[in-house]
């Protein structure tokens, strides 16, 4: 029964995806990707629409049939996921050129601050920075969401750090079609197999199912997730880590995420993928030639 949120959200996303794709294109909501192809954007809103629609039957079943279809952790998960979705959507709507790579052309993106250093410098110059807003907003949301899990102060701060860094790292990965969703799938498979526990997947399933559907459209270059979708992928990855790993495991995850964040600030992750055999082939798998 606990898999029901995942299944209903998956069904809603599969039905709504073609409709949303057409609506975005007809409404002129398109943006050039890294190959300058104009694609519907931001397709990450599919996860928001599908999850909210799936909540209607889920809440009716849980309340009227007195059947527990949602885990207690569903509230902090929804709080962080919806908040990060909103921050990503604001970035997609307010940032004029988007980010370089998949979600914006290089010419447009060159005019925008990049990374935490770039956004911090923009704030110091008195400019409005959607990136700084996302960073600060994600931290506030993470601290609030993790406060519902009954953790000690140290574990609370640790979990919030994992959430914020995971959200940022997966945003950095979203420079080529399907890259972030592939990383999410590999991470989830590793966590599920390593822990032999699917409970965390069902906890985040209301949002995980539709973002995977959106990610498949992203992979095939039929649409772009935008920061709306990439932020959510990172948020769900962080939540999966927090819900699965022990304190020691979360410390290791935090260190790895911090290292990836630092690398992304100083170097190009896309360049690293392109020059690394195995990663290059995995990255290009499923993408149109």
Image (cartoon, rainbow, N blue to C red):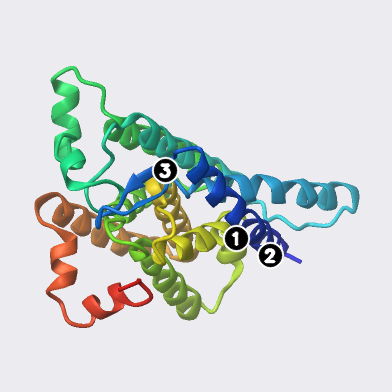
Q: Earlier in the sequence, mark 2 or mark 3?
A: 2
Decide: few, some or many residues near mark 3? Use Cα within 10 Å; few <14, some 14-19, many ≥20: few
User: Which residue is identified by label 1?
Assistant: 205
- Along the line of sight, the residue nearer the viewer: 122 or 68: 122
Q: Is residue 198 above or below residue 40?
A: below
Q: Secondary structure at mark 2?
A: helix
Q: Earlier in the sequence, mark 2 or mark 1?
A: 2
Instruction: Locate the C terminus by quadrant.
Output: bottom left
The picture quadrant where one finds residue 2 is: bottom right
Side of 108 relative to 146 (left or right) = left
Q: Is residue 138 above or below residue 265?
A: above
Q: CA distance from mark 2 to mark 3?
A: 35 Å
User: Which residue is identified by label 3?
Assistant: 153
Side of 36 relative to 218 (left or right) = left
Mark 2–mark 1 contact, CB under 8 Å?
Answer: yes
Residue 7 is labelled as 2
Q: Secondary structure at mark 3?
A: helix
Q: CA distance from mark 2 to mark 1?
A: 8 Å
> Residue 284: x percent and y percent?
29, 74
> Residue 37: x percent and y percent?
31, 54
> Residue 116: x percent and y percent?
20, 39
Residue at the right extreme of this rendering: 65
Given this view, does label 2 or label 3 mark the residue nearer the observer?
2
Q: Secondary structure at mark 1?
A: helix
- Along the line of sight, the residue nearer the viewer: 71 or 59: 59
Instruction: Locate the N terminus by quadrant.
Output: bottom right
- Along the line of sight, the residue nearer the viewer: 100 or 289: 289
> Residue 76: x percent and y percent?
56, 45
């Amino acid at each position: 029964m606990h898999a029901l949120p995942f299944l209903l959200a998956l069904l809603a996303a599969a039905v709504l995806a073609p409709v949303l794709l057409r609506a975005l294109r007809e409404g002129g909501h398109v943006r050039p990707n890294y190959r300058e192809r104009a694609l519907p954007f931001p397709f990450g809103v599919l996860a928001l629409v599908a999850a909210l629609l799936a909540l209607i039957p889920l809440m009716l079943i849980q309340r009227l049939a007195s059947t527990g279809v949602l885990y207690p952790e569903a509230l902090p998960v929804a709080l962080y996921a919806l908040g990060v979705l909103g921050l990503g959507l604001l970035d997609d709507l307010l940032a004029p050129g988007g980010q370089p790579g998949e979600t914006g052309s290089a010419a447009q993106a060159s005019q925008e601050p990049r990374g935490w250093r770039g956004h911090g410098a923009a704030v110091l110059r008195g400019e409005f920075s959607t990136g700084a807003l996302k960073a600060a907003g994600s931290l506030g949301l993470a601290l609030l969401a993790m406060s519902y899990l009954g953790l000690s102060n140290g574990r609370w701060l640790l979990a919030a750090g994992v959430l914020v860094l995971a959200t940022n790292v997966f945003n950095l990965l979203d420079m080529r079609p399907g890259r972030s969703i592939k990383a999410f799938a590999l991470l989830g498979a590793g966590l599920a197999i390593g822990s032999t526990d699917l409970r965390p997947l069902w906890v985040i399933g209301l949002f995980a199912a539709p973002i995977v559907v959106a990610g498949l459209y992203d992979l095939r270059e039929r649409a772009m997730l935008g920061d709306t979708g990439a932020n959510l992928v990172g948020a769900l990855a962080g939540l999966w880590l927090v819900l699965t790993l022990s304190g020691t495991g979360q410390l290791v995850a935090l260190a790895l995420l911090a290292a990836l964040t630092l690398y992304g600030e100083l170097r190009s992750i896309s360049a690293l993928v392109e020059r690394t055999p195995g990663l290059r082939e995995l990255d290009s798998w499923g993408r149109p030639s």
